[in-house]
Amino acid sequence: MASFRKRENGLWEYRISYVDRRTGKYRLKSKGGFKTKKEAELAAAAEELKIDEYGFSENGNELIENYMEKWLEIYKRPAVKLNTFLVQERAVRRTILPRWGRYRWKDITRNEYQKWINELREKYSEGTVRRIHSIFSTAANDAVHEFKILRENPLQKIKIMKDDDQESGKIKFFTVDELSRFLAACVPIKNAKYQHSRHYQALFTLIARTGLRIGEALALTWNDIDFENGTLTVNKTLIYPLNSDPRVTTPKTKSSIRTIRLDDGTVKMLKAYQKNQKETILRYGFKRSDLKLVFHQQDGRWLRINVVREYMKEVCKRVGLPQLSPHALRHSHAVHLLEAGATIRYVAERLGHASIKTTEKYLHVTKKIEKDALALYEQYVR
């Protein structure tokens, strides 16, 4: 509801009271400087329309905290896949809002923002900083072009320092010998509490032999494995939403839904691990998984991704290997397949890549493929 009054200087002012749809609290918005009451009425009508349509404040005055909350929940969550939304939400809540939440859009200067980006680059990789900047800049673009609450994006023409040439785009993976050393070490150390358990060794071996993503591996149930035909079906993935319980959702892309053929050694390993899992549950009084999960905690629930990552780093450190993440095992599988002579298309389908271009990056990380190809050429032209 708008009200109007004439100020002592002879100019008109409007005041609009409304309920903030995010907090449920009453807000008051005012603006003066109009020569006539009619001008004030027209401006108030336009502002009320904007509030009704978007729930955002006038040009540049919206608190970034308020804007980003509404932008995420109302405009982004319904428009993107859940996994994508969770990545964006995490970046907003953990990185963007702690620094910029109490700012108004009109208060951000390019210099201050560039300084912040430079500080981020000292802590994070180029890719991570580009992702954070992209999310924030996209939100600013929407403020300009979709909601008309900003005249221009203050986050444009920002420079992000590139990684060193030697590290840029570098794929981290284990050689065949390194992988063997790592997997052999993935057993409980002396005096560990659960000496009989082999779930970490089985988990890492499976990823290294199939190229599964960590979320795909942790979401697996025994029903997904066909021992008779030697196949494994991927149709779900485990995700950890920010500040909430884990959940299983559909995989990253349509191409991620796939059936993978298992080699005989992996089938044998999984059968042995299935037996080991039953023995471990009985020996230590663990709870059986109601979902028949292939990998689970003592209480029968999903393993936590961050715990798996930390365990892997500890093993790598203990045996003197590069401290890589579980995703490096997926990279290792792709590289080893190509070194063994597999085609790019086969590797792309096995890993569930949406585009073969994603797979082609592995061709540049190993000298063995180049060496073998040259040897075949020399044999051919003799």
Image: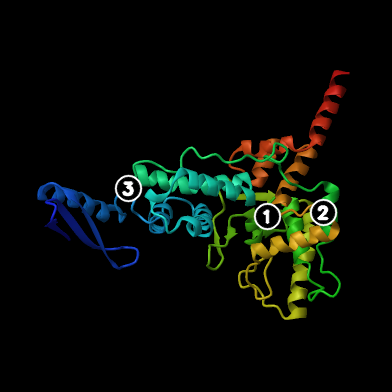
What amino acid is at disc 1? Answer: Leu
Nearest to N terminus: mark 2 or mark 1: 1
Q: Are marks 3 and 1 in contact (CB under 8 Å)?
A: no
Residue sitting at x 40%, y 54%: 71
Q: Are marks 2 and 1 in contact (CB under 8 Å)?
A: no
Tell me where residue 72 sits by quadrant: bottom left
Which residue ends up furthest to the right in the rendered image? 382
Residue toward you, 364 or 208 = 364
Residue toward you, 91 or 257 = 91
| Element type at mark 1 | strand
* Residue 262 seen by the camera: no
Marks 3 and 1, how far apart at CA = 51 Å
Residue toward you, 181 or 269 = 181
| Element type at mark 2 | loop
Nearest to N terminus: mark 3 or mark 2: 3
Tell me where residue 365 sits by quadrant: top right
Tell me where residue 303 sits by quadrant: bottom right
Nearest to N terminus: mark 3 or mark 1: 3
* Whole-percent x, y for residue 310 in the image: 71, 62
What amino acid is at disc 3? Answer: Ile
